[in-house]
Amino acid sequence: MLRESMSPTVLQLKRNQQILTELVRVYIETGEPVSSRSVARRHVEALSSATIRNVMADLEDEGLLYQPHTSAGRVPTAAAYRFFVEQVTAQATASPEDRLWIRRELEAAQTPEAVMERASQVLAAVSRGLGIFISPPLASAVVEHIRFLLLPDGRVLVVLISAGNNTRDKLIRPERPFRQEDLDRTADYLNRHYVGWTLEAMRADLRKQLEMDRERYGQLANDALLLCDPSILGDAGERKIYVDGAAQIASSPDFTNPEQLRELLEAIDEKDRLIALLSGCIESPEPVHVELGLDKISNEGKHLAIVSASYSSKDQAQGTLGILAPMRMHYDRVITAVAFMAQIFSEERQGS
């Protein structure tokens, strides 16, 4: 959103919108303050440099541009980027070349973990920043098959196959001893009644069954709740996160102060902080969530932007993916790549 105190009148004219859009596009491509002459050469209408200079002055007065030096051209502010992103989001679609390339890269990976790692690499490749892929927490994973194996020492190996053939296994020591036939009976019941459910939803339904008919479901439901408890399985909110592209941010011309760069890299190296940043897109009504200026990361975070999307299964958000990069990035390609990849992962889970 543009800042609330700003008058919308300057952007009510289509000409002014086009000039601002072209200026932001030129700055993204060059990284240099943009002159009126640069905009005039690209503008669809035949406007003089003087006319464009006047418009740029008006845009600067409204906080959309600033002039780093008196004799320099203008540079877009976060508000200008926000306007530009809104234009891009409404019109852009992933190119056929990018669609083919992204699918080919993901299909080359052999395991679910390799696919997620490759996804972060692809996202980094379309930006000058980090590609981030976050798997769903265990409680939110859509379960396709469950198996329990009794070990000689009494421990139980819990094997969960979630959507996309992603396998998770965990050794637990239950509160009471089990026989293999009890484990098989419990697994058979869960696989017959709860395929395609999340652990969270499955456990909620089991509790409801217990309340309705404890005599009928008592031991079976209690066993299932015990064996499929995310806290016992070691979830504790832990999520796998795949990150690629830190070297690109380190070499970005947008960050020239070594001490500030070190602070920034340390901040984004904290996985919990990245997870918190991307989790905002789950509550966002837009298919792709864009946040500009990330002061909460570090002082240098004000120069960063995050573009993220969630992927889902059966209308339930599963995980998130996105790009964390300098604000001066090619939003056309980044936004469409993030949206297309989220679509791919959602389709895989719907078809599983």
Image (cartoon, rainbow, N blue to C red):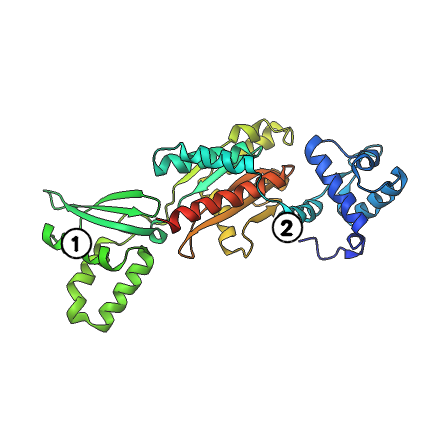
- x%, y% of residue 304? 60, 40
Residue 266 appears in the rendering: no
Q: Secondary structure at mark 2?
A: helix
Q: Residues within 10 Å of mark 2 (few under 14, many from 20)?
A: few
Q: Is residue 218 visible?
A: yes
Left or right of 161, for residue 133: right
| Numbered label tally | 2
Residue closest to the eye, 70 or 158: 158
Q: Which residue is mark 1?
A: 175
- Helix, strand or loop at label 1? It is loop
Q: CA distance from mark 2 to mark 1?
A: 55 Å
- 116 and 274: which one is in front? 116
User: In this image, 202 relative to 187: left or right?
Assistant: right
**Which residue sits furthest front?**
96
The answer to whether residue 229 is above or below residue 54 is below
Q: Quadrant of residue 333?
A: top right
Q: Earlier in the sequence, mark 2 or mark 1?
A: 2
Q: Which label is found at residue 281?
A: none
- Dot 1 crowding, Cα within 10 Å, few <14, some 14–19, many 20+: few
Q: Amino acid at mark 2?
A: Ala
Residue occupying image coordinates x 51% and y 42%: 322
- Residue 230: x percent and y percent? 29, 52
Q: Which residue is labeled 2 in the image?
A: 90
Q: Position of residue 247 (x, y in %)?
A: 53, 27
Q: Residue furthest bottom?
A: 212
Image vertical order of residue 234 relative to residue 116, above or below: below
Residue 79 position in % (x across, y down): 70, 48
At 75% from the left and 55% from the top, the residue drawn is: 6
Q: Is residue 117 rendered to the left or right of residue 161? A: right
Q: Quadrant of residue 241?
A: top left
The amino acid on which the numbered mark 1 sits, given as a three-letter code, is Glu
Instruction: Look at discs 2 and 1 and give the one toward the viewer.
Output: 2
